[in-house]
Image: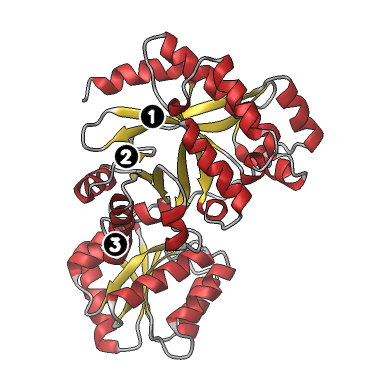
Amino acid sequence: MDIAHLHFLVAEADQAQRLAVVDMLGKLGASQVSEVPDGHSTLRFLNESFAPAVDIAIVDLGLPGMDGLELIRTLAGMNCRTRVIVAGAQPSNLLFSVETMAQAYGLDLLGTIAKPVTVSRLQALIENYVPPPQRSERPRGPTFSFSDIGIGLQARQFEPYFQPKIELATGQVKGLETFARWVHPEHGVLGPHAFIDALEQHNRIDFLDWTMIEKSVERCREFQDKGTPIPISINLAPETLAHAGFIQQITACVQRHRVMPDYITFEMPESSVLTTDPTFLERLVRLRMMGFGLAIDDYGTGRSNLQLLARVPFSELKIDRSFVDGASKKRALGTVLSSCLGLARSLDRMSVAVGVETKQDWDFLQGLGCTYAQGYHIAKPMEAEAFPGWLEDWRHFF
């Protein structure tokens, strides 16, 4: 990336430090650098139609007038497209919290940098820069009523797409996770954004769950018949499990397709699994006694109760992607990820890292002893017919 074409703004109250950062940018090849001494000036610079527009703003957390925290909140409310680097003299764990806050506000941060700013650290963050996508005037995607979705389900237009789950120690494919897709006759393949909200609003997510269960178990049988026996994980809403006839129906389903229960794992969000409801816990235990796997999904995004976690009969702990992305570069995030993996090992459970997007993510997780990984670095969700060909290609590497 040629940073000579980027416009930088350095917002720093201390003149000596401000000039030092400007000098560093010049050494890195920047030719367009503006500077301001306070928060209000920064806001005016980014809020008004300066030409050329600022691509990257390096903002001191302790700016006078409007400090970095208030500035982050304000810029997020403006839908500011400038990428931001926050600098501060605060401890690294506090800077990490600032980064988390900015992300929660929706501000696109390149990262944080502890003072004194160094050329190497500054360069590393600038290298993360990707130009924001052009604002598009494309029409919004189609919207569908609950009735439309029901017709699609009845017409068997919904299909499971499968994303491989890889054992990090060996590189072997150890499972597939199901993702619901609507293969619409007019609009093509549609993701959950097209149908989940309407189903949840009408309390009928079970319609989709049972379609995915039935078709996923059917595909599991087909894979076995073609010489590729592979376990499949299926997302399951707590409302579906709570239905009085669930155990009877799932028993009939696996028997109908001649699939052993240990080839099927149900994934449920952490917030719904960690409960003291005895009826719900009974069903979880019954599923495990029948041989089905149980994965706690999105671990770390809820309010974990470690005592309950130890009591729930889960077989896999799926670490949320928010702990995986960037963990190799951010010490605090890496520590949390390592702690989650250690918890899974201490409870004698398998760990699955979700959202593995880069080779760096893969290597870092492998070094931490994570059991399984899945994400776009490995493969995007694919239709069942594409899996055998993908598997053959993958096996050339491992």
Q: Amino acid at mark 1?
A: Gly
Q: CA distance from mark 3 to mark 1?
A: 36 Å
Q: Which is in the foreground here, disc 3 or disc 1? A: 1
Residue 379 image point, x, y percent: 38, 31
Q: Amino acid at mark 3?
A: Leu
Local crowd size for mark 2, using a 10 Å CA cut-off: few (<14), some (14–19), many (≥20) = many
Q: Looking at the image, is 97 positioned above or below residue 263?
A: below
Q: On the image, which quarter does residue 93 sit in?
A: bottom left
Q: On the image, which quarter does residue 113 sit in?
A: bottom left
Query: Where is mark 3, residue-wise?
Result: 125
Residue 269 image point, x, y percent: 53, 49
Q: Amino acid at mark 2?
A: Tyr
Q: Which is nearer the eye, 76 or 253?
A: 253
Q: Looking at the image, is 340 positioned above or below residue 179?
A: below
Q: CA distance from mark 2 to mark 3?
A: 29 Å
Query: Where is mark 1, residue-wise?
Result: 175
Q: Which is nearer the eye, 254 or 286?
A: 286
The mark that comes first in sequence, 1 or 2, is: 1
* Residue at image coords 21%, 25%: 398
Q: Residue furthest top?
A: 226
- Label 3 SS: helix
Query: Where is mark 2, residue-wise?
Result: 372
Q: Residue furthest right?
A: 147
Residue 242 image point, x, y percent: 66, 43
Q: Which is nearer the eye, 162 or 294?
A: 294
* Residue at image coords 49%, 49%: 133
